């Protein structure tokens, strides 16, 4: 039997069977453990996209740091931007261990981003023209992110789950900050309420898109199935979108704000929200690097990456000298 034979001598099928049993039993896979290439690829895709999205996600709000209306708000949004960059660094550290056996480095991940070979979330390609956009991003985009990140806390890959634990704690502060900004605007002057409504109108479709297309039949996409099979995630895109609608539609309406979808309703019989499908062709365009702010933000990111090169090189030399 395979158990009596050293692991290195097991056949590929035996190794795969053993690996899948570990997943089924809820065991955590660690960076040095044997894993099928398919699992590694799925992890790399998921974690680099998440990490890069955290970094690119700081940009729409960063624009509002110099223009925040009060010192208290400025400190809060600055802390949030800093948190998001930290989440990105934490996740790229996890991704770095995964790409290493493939002969790739963290530098390669960043270069892939600059060359548009890596995707990041659709919402972070969009403009944030008013202070109300900063409010809606922190309240609803972070709210949507919390739903999908909380779902992955029990992910089968140990290092990702541990990074997510810390990230989720900070994300809940972000949502509170967004709630506070939104409430102030909702209770404000008619001009502030109008600004908030316009931001909701702008962000509604990107928010529905955030969870991804409904079915693989619609997109030919099997990544979600793969992530479910390997227990990297536990819910489908549509389950998460329905959760989001159940949580936030009543809250938005409670503030007296309108949702820009006249077809939106909860179907009691089906037990689900009926909504107008976002334009998935537009989604595809955006996530493949053709969003309204993609080029500008990638240019900014590349400039700041190049400006920080001397720090990375100095640290690498110091580390080499210390060994
Ligand atoms: Fe984050
Ligand atoms: Fe956040």
Image (spheres, rainbow, N blue to C red):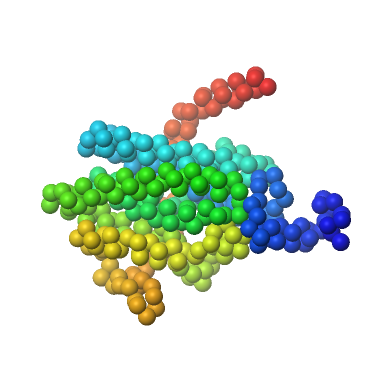
Q: Which residue is rendered at x = 61% and y = 63% of the image?
A: 229
Q: Position of residue 31 (x, y in %)?
A: 66, 45
Residue 97, horizontal then vertical, whole percent: 63, 42
**Residue 278 position (above or below residue 115):** below
Q: In which image quadrant can residue 225 be found? A: bottom right
Depth order, front residue of 62/273: 273
Q: Is residue 65 left or right of residue 217?
A: left
Q: Is residue 147 left or right of residue 231?
A: left
x and y percent of residue 147 in the render?
Answer: 43, 56
Q: Is residue 142 left or right of residue 229?
A: left
- Where residue 249 appears, as percent x and y from the top left, is 30, 63
Residue at 19% of width from left, 60% of height from top? 256
Locate the N terminus and report the quarter of the image it occupies.
bottom right
Give the quadrant of the C terminus: top right
Q: Nearer the viewer, residue 224 or 106?
A: 224
**Image quadrant assignment for residue 273:** bottom left
């Amino acid at each position: 039997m395979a158990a009596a034979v050293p692991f290195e001598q097991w056949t590929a099928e035996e190794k795969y069977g053993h690996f899948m049993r570990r997943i089924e039993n809820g065991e955590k896979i660690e960076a040095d453990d044997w894993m099928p290439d398919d699992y590694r690829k799925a992890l790399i895709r998921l974690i680099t996209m998440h990490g890069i999205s955290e970094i690119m996600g700081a940009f729409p709000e960063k624009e509002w740091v110099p223009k925040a209306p009060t010192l208290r708000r400025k400190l809060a949004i600055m802390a949030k931007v800093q948190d998001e960059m930290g989440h990105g660094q934490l996740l790229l550290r996890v991704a770095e261990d995964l790409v290493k056996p493939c002969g790739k480095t963290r530098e390669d991940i960043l270069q892939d981003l600059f060359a548009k070979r890596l995707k990041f979330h659709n919402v972070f390609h969009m403009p944030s023209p008013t202070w109300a956009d900063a409010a809606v991003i922190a309240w609803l985009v972070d709210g949507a992110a919390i739903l999908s990140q909380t779902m992955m806390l029990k992910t089968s890959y140990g290092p990702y789950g541990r990074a997510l634990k810390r990230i989720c704690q900070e994300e809940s502060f972000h949502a509170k900050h967004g709630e506070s900004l939104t409430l102030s605007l909702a209770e404000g002057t008619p001009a502030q309420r109008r600004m908030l409504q316009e931001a909701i109108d702008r962000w509604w479709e990107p928010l529905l898109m955030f969870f991804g297309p409904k079915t693989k039949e619609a997109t030919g996409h099997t990544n979600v199935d793969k992530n479910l099979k390997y227990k990297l995630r536990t819910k489908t895109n549509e389950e998460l979108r329905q959760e989001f609608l159940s949580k936030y539609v009543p809250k938005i309406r409670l503030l007296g704000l309108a949702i820009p979808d006249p077809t939106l309703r909860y179907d009691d019989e089906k037990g689900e929200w009926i909504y107008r499908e976002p334009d998935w062709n537009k989604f595809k365009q955006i996530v493949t690097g053709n969003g309204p702010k993609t080029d500008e933000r990638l240019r900014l990111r590349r400039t700041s990456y190049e400006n920080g090169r001397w720090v990375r090189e100095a640290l690498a030399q110091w580390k080499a000298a210390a060994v």
